[in-house]
């Protein structure tokens, strides 16, 4: 079923944009909007079933060969952004507490996995049943057992390194594909204090290779995992984009979709309208369409696609498109010890604690993280210093090597007032209204952050650290895990998609990614995104 166009290779973004073939596939079974982890996994799964798949990605395709250069750009003075976020293309407005959307919004093949930290936990069983268990939020239309086999498949696909040492984790069928990374030096410092306090530490499952896996090298310890991994050990969705391409998928980068167009009856999408760098507008037709462009852009594209039959935007009879925008909030306490902590020698977390996640005081989940990259980087400090020689050395020795911190994520329950809308008074480079983010933090969430801070402070005080900073309710910020704007549910009057991520109103349109999460828990969302995407891919295939 693959057309000749499906096998055309796309060169890297630093080549001549106009020389690339960005014309539509003549006959596509499935058109996917977005080449992040959700879109990439679905594309590979379906292309491997001999379906004709085309992916439209708003941003460029980056070259693996440029990763060392990107790392160098990041660590030099000014710490330039290697992924070119922000600017008029990514313009937005915000209200309420204010949401710094462009601090982590990557547009490009690979999506958020281009610069993510790489921690991958399963949601707990309670996360799917918040309404029925605690009378807050809503229940998911599926439970943990429905997603359990897809979690295992997602861990295999991403190459997760982990251990069976977490007594609070949900049940699992097998061990992780790769062995866990050993605890960092600072983890060994935390351990006695946590034992004194009765706080359990356990390993962090990471989507990075602890040994060679799936054609990718083992971690080389560069320590710049966020924003760029030069070795390729950390998983990015580029891996499955390449696999999808090898299976015949057609990848079109720098092709931002402007709107979806439905047929005369308004019951099915007929084409995706996209623009290319030379200003050409193309229409991609397909039997099935999948939106996989993130918690903000999924909602925005549905709203931009309003019509006479759908005056409030596609799939939005419920009014839920854009609403219930949630994130995870950061809580942290840090300071210094009178002994070396070897800060920054590992660029990712190796130990965490889920002990305070499932208890009910407060209901909002808390996940603690033992940070081994707290404090300033000596490289950045040296490169930005205004002194040299022995004086610089003394400054570095006084400010580096003994910092330590406990961080964590806190759950935010969904509220309809937190939402994504269109701001018609400001437009992007294509003349479309930019997304407007309304986001605030309620007292329940603030109370959970304060509780996390109390636990974190007790750990550092028991450790004997001098506490220098606290990130609490008044200073917290988001983890950039944008969820909830196209929530799933069984009632079409209260949700956007069903349990298979298909929209209630359009028979051939699916929405995937964290935007479908009814609630977000406090676990990093990418593994759940991957599991839901694999499940949705099976549902899509069954309809063709």
Image (cartoon, grey):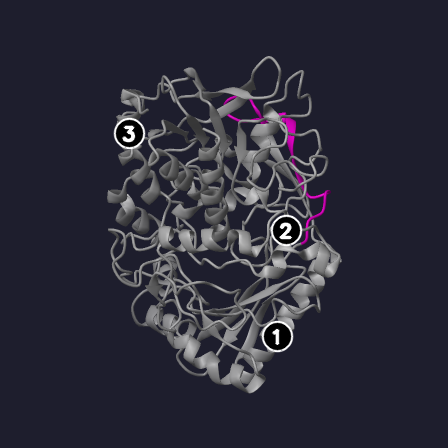
The Cα atoms of the two marked residues, 2 and 1, are separated by 24 Å
**536 displayed left or right of 386:** right
Whether tag 2 and tag 1 are in contact, CB under 8 A, the answer is no
Judge whether residue 476 can be spotted in this image: no
Quadrant holding the C terminus:
top left
**Image vertical order of residue 298 relative to residue 347, above or below:** above
Q: Which mark is residue 144?
A: none
Looking at the image, which residue is at 70% across and 63% down?
A: 363
Furthest residue in direction top, as rendered = 264
Residue 306, image x and y in percent?
Answer: 63, 21
Is residue 432 rendered magenta in the image? yes
* Residue of label 3: 10
Which mark is first along the chain, 1 or 2?
1
The magenta-colored residue range is 413-433
* Residue of label 1: 455
Quadrant holding the N terminus:
top left
The image quadrant that residue 452 belongs to is bottom right
Residue 534, image x and y in percent?
Answer: 45, 44
* Residue of label 2: 519
Please name which of the two marks, 3 or 1, marks the residue nearer to the observer. Answer: 3
């Amino acid at each position: 079923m693959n057309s000749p166009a499906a096998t055309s290779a796309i060169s890297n973004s630093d080549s001549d944009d106009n020389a690339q073939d960005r014309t539509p596939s003549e006959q596509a079974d499935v058109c996917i909007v977005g080449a992040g982890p959700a879109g990439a996994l679905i594309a590979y799964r379906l292309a491997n079933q001999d379906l004709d798949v085309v992916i439209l990605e708003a941003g460029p395709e980056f070259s693996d060969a440029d990763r060392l250069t990107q790392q160098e750009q990041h660590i030099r003075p000014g710490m330039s952004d290697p992924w070119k976020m922000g600017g008029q293309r990514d313009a937005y407005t915000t209200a309420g507490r204010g949401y710094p959307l462009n601090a982590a919004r990557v547009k490009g093949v690979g999506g958020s996995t281009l610069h993510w930290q790489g921690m991958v936990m399963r949601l707990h069983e309670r996360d799917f049943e918040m309404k029925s268990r605690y009378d807050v939020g809503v229940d998911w239309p599926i439970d943990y057992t429905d997603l359990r086999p897809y979690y295992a498949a997602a861990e295999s696909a991403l190459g997760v390194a982990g251990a069976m040492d977490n007594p609070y984790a949900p049940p699992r069928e097998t061990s992780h594909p790769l062995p866990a990374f050993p605890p960092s030096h600072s983890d060994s410092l935390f351990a006695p204090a946590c034992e004194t306090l009765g706080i359990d530490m356990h390993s962090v499952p990471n989507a990075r290779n602890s040994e060679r896996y799936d054609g990718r090298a083992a971690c080389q310890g560069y320590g710049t995992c966020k924003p760029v991994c030069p070795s390729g050990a950390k998983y990015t969705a580029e891996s499955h984009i390449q696999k999808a391409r090898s299976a015949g998928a057609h990848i079109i980068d720098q092709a931002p979709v402007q709107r979806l167009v439905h047929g005369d009856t308004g019951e099915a999408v007929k084409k995706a309208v996209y623009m290319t760098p030379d200003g050409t507008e193309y229409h991609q037709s397909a039997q099935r369409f999948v939106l996989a462009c993130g918690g903000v852009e999924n909602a925005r594209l549905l709203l931009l696609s309003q019509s006479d039959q759908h005056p409030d935007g596609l799939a939005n009879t419920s009014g839920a498109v854009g609403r219930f925008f949630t994130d995870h909030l950061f809580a942290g306490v840090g300071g210094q010890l009178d002994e070396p902590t070897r800060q920054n020698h590992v660029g990712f977390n190796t130990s965490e604690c889920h002990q305070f996640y499932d208890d009910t005081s407060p209901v909002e989940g808390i996940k603690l993280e033992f940070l081994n990259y707290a404090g300033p980087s000596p490289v950045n400090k040296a490169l930005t210093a205004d002194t040299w020689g022995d004086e610089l050395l003394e400054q570095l020795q006084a400010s580096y090597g003994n910092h330590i911190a406990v961080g964590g994520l806190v759950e935010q329950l969904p509220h309809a007032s937190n939402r994504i809308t269109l701001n018609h008074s400001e437009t992007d480079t294509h003349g479309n209204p930019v997304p407007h983010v309304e986001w605030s933090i309620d007292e329940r969430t603030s109370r959970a952050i304060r509780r996390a801070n109390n636990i974190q402070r007790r750990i550092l005080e028991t450790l004997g650290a001098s506490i220098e900073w606290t990130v609490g309710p008044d200073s917290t910020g988001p983890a950039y895990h944008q969820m909830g704007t196209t929530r799933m549910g069984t009632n079409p009057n209260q949700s956007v998609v069903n349990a298979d991520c298909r929209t209630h109103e359009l028979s051939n349109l699916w929405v995937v990614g964290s935007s479908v999460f009814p609630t977000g828990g406090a676990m990093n969302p990418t593994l759940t995104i991957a599991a839901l995407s694999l499940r949705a891919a099976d549902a899509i295939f069954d309809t063709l």
